[in-house]
Amino acid sequence: MELNERQKKIIEITKENGPITGEQIAEKLNLTRATLRPDLAILTMSGFLEARPRVGYFYTGKTQSQLLTDKVKKMTVKSYQSIPVVVEESASAYDAICTMFLEDVGTLFVVNKDGVLIGALSRKDLLRASLGNQDLSAIPISVIMSRMPNITYCHSHDLIIDVAKLLIERQIDGMPVVKETDKGLEVTGRLTKTNVTRAFVELAEGQFD
């Protein structure tokens, strides 16, 4: 985030005089406490300053790079995951192609009759099945999909940065977000390269909590 001149002055005053109260900062800047309230809130939420009741504000000593790193380490899958697109293992390759086209996704997650994750189907899998003069409506996706335990997945509480590393390492476009049940892994979402990109764009623009 880009600090304005007043916010930079507040940081300098706090660095030199902290702990210092909001009233004392306002006095040094010849402003009212109410005028400073938004700036103090931004600096505190961003991590430049820390506020302690009945003590005042003090400078945390963290640079913008360190604060950015702190934010990245707090970003979880839950905040950025998308709705998953699943198909049952009994579906045909033709059904899968139609679903992938209509839902505009690059990967389908395959579940059994109990809704448990058993595999994944990519564009490459379907393209491979389409070669030749095969009847796609007669080819079950269970024959062409990648199967568990060879599916990379994540949980909603996982960190975005860790999942991003997995996407790069495994050279995949996305993975299912799952939760563990008595029957197996239930798909609750999906996390793709697009989701990760959006997360870091929002971070760069300062649109984070």
Image: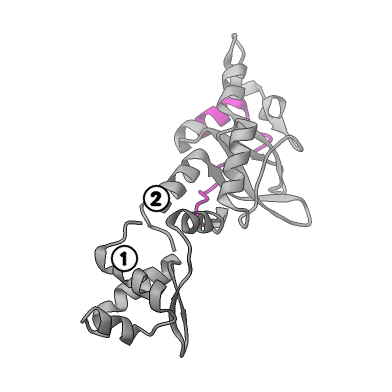
Horizontal side, residue 148 vs residue 198: left or right: right
Label 1 or label 2, whichever comes before in sequence order: 1
- Label 2 crowd (10 A; few <14 / some 14-19 / many >=20): few
Above or below residue 1? Residue 154 is above
Provide the residue span drawn in magenta.
79-99
Above or below residue 6? Residue 72 is above
Dot 1 falls on a residue whose secondary structure is helix
Horizontal side, residue 34 vs residue 117: left or right: left
Residue picked out by circle 1: 8
Residue picked out by circle 2: 204
Could you tell me the amino acid type at mark 1?
Lys
Magenta region includes residue 91: yes
The residue under the point 59% across, 53% down is 159
Dot 2 falls on a residue whose secondary structure is helix
> Whole-percent x and y of residue 177?
62, 49
> Whole-percent x and y of residue 30?
21, 81
From where the camera sits, is residue 30 visible? yes
